[in-house]
Amino acid sequence: MTALLLALAVSLSVFGAFHGIRLYRADVKLPSDLALALEVGATRTTAVGSLVDRIGIRWAPLVLRAMGAARVARKRRQIDMAGNPAGLTIDRYAARRAVYGVLGAAGAFSMLVNGQLVAALLMVAFGLFWIEVGLWSAIRVRRDHIERTLPDFLDVLAVVVSAGLGFRQALDRVAGKYEGPWADEVRITLQQMDMGVSRRQAFDELRRRNDSEQVAQFVTALQQGEELGSPIVDTLIAIAEDMRRTDAQNARRRAARAVPKATFAVTMFMLPGTLILLVCGFVYGANVDFGALFGGG
């Protein structure tokens, strides 16, 4: 009970500190870039996420300066690879990092006061890695979605190109029939080419934004085919077939890794539980007198 009251007191203290700072700085106007990031992000995130952004956005420049230019560049690339989930930007990432860090530190301090070392370590991990876990998960989900969509997209694109449309027009036509991250990436690439970026540079940017071997394979094969003068339809069909073979090989690898895991689960949990159930059933059905058996009278 004492630990719960102490944790509640620390939480109220943290809330009071944030609220007091907010009142103290109520007349301070946010820089235009931070205000724009906050306004845009609020339309694409949850109410809790918007509240966290509003609390921490003033400390975003401090967090970014502490991270350094190189780390900020790497983090911005990770956000791009995640597809800016829920409108996430580098400024909103820094705001959430500040808020989660303060909450994790306050929680760890309250746990240490009560001698709960494991809980304190968990709170420290929350403050350091909670935003990172969401970012890593978004990157993986987005990459899996793109790799599932890409082979079928290339098949349809090959059919449209073979019907007589140019490659750029065919990309625009096919992307309009798809939804999801890959269609968004194709539209971004087309917009870059409309703004004067060369096709090679636009596809290089497409490869940089996506942490996917299949996207890299698609861009590399497309550029090599363009340099060698091979027909674009044959190149697209060959890329799609290679991707399907790669998917089949990856599926076999995942299945092979799943067998030991299933065997471990059966051996460690299901088999002992089944044996215990059988022995208990036999003992109960035999009406064994344990008192007489062990000399208890």
Image (tube, helix red, strand yellow):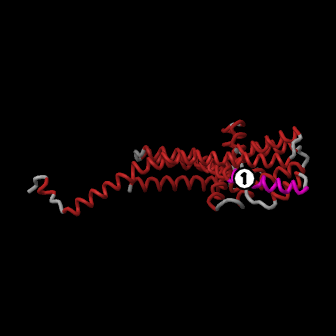
Could you tell me if residue 29 is visible in this image? no
Q: How many marks?
A: 1
2 and 211: which is toward the camera: 211
Mark 1: amino acid: Val
Residue beneath label 1, please? 28
Looking at the rendering, the stretch of residues picked out in magenta corresponds to 145-164
| Category of crowding for the residue at label 1, using alpha-carbon neighbours closer than 10 angstroms: few (below 14), some (14–19), many (at least 20) | few
- Where, quadrant-wise, is the N terminus in this rendering? bottom left
Q: Is residue 214 left or right of residue 200?
A: left
From the viewer's perspective, is residue 172 above or below residue 264? below
231 and 175: which is toward the camera: 231
Percent position (x, y) of residue 246?
Answer: 67, 45
The answer to which quarter of the image holds residue 45 is bottom right
Identity of the residue drawn at 89% across and 41% down: 229
Identity of the residue drawn at 55% across and 48% down: 255
Percent position (x, y) of residue 58?
Answer: 68, 49
Q: Is residue 155 left or right of residue 228?
A: left
Identify the main secondary structure in magenta: helix
Percent position (x, y) of residue 61?
Answer: 70, 44
220 and 23: which is toward the camera: 220
Could you tell me if residue 52 is visible in this image? yes
Q: Is residue 43 left or right of residue 5?
A: right
Is residue 151 within the magenta segment?
Answer: yes
Is residue 165 within the magenta segment?
Answer: no
227 and 123: which is toward the camera: 227
Identity of the residue drawn at 61% across and 48% down: 251
Identity of the residue drawn at 87% across and 45% down: 231
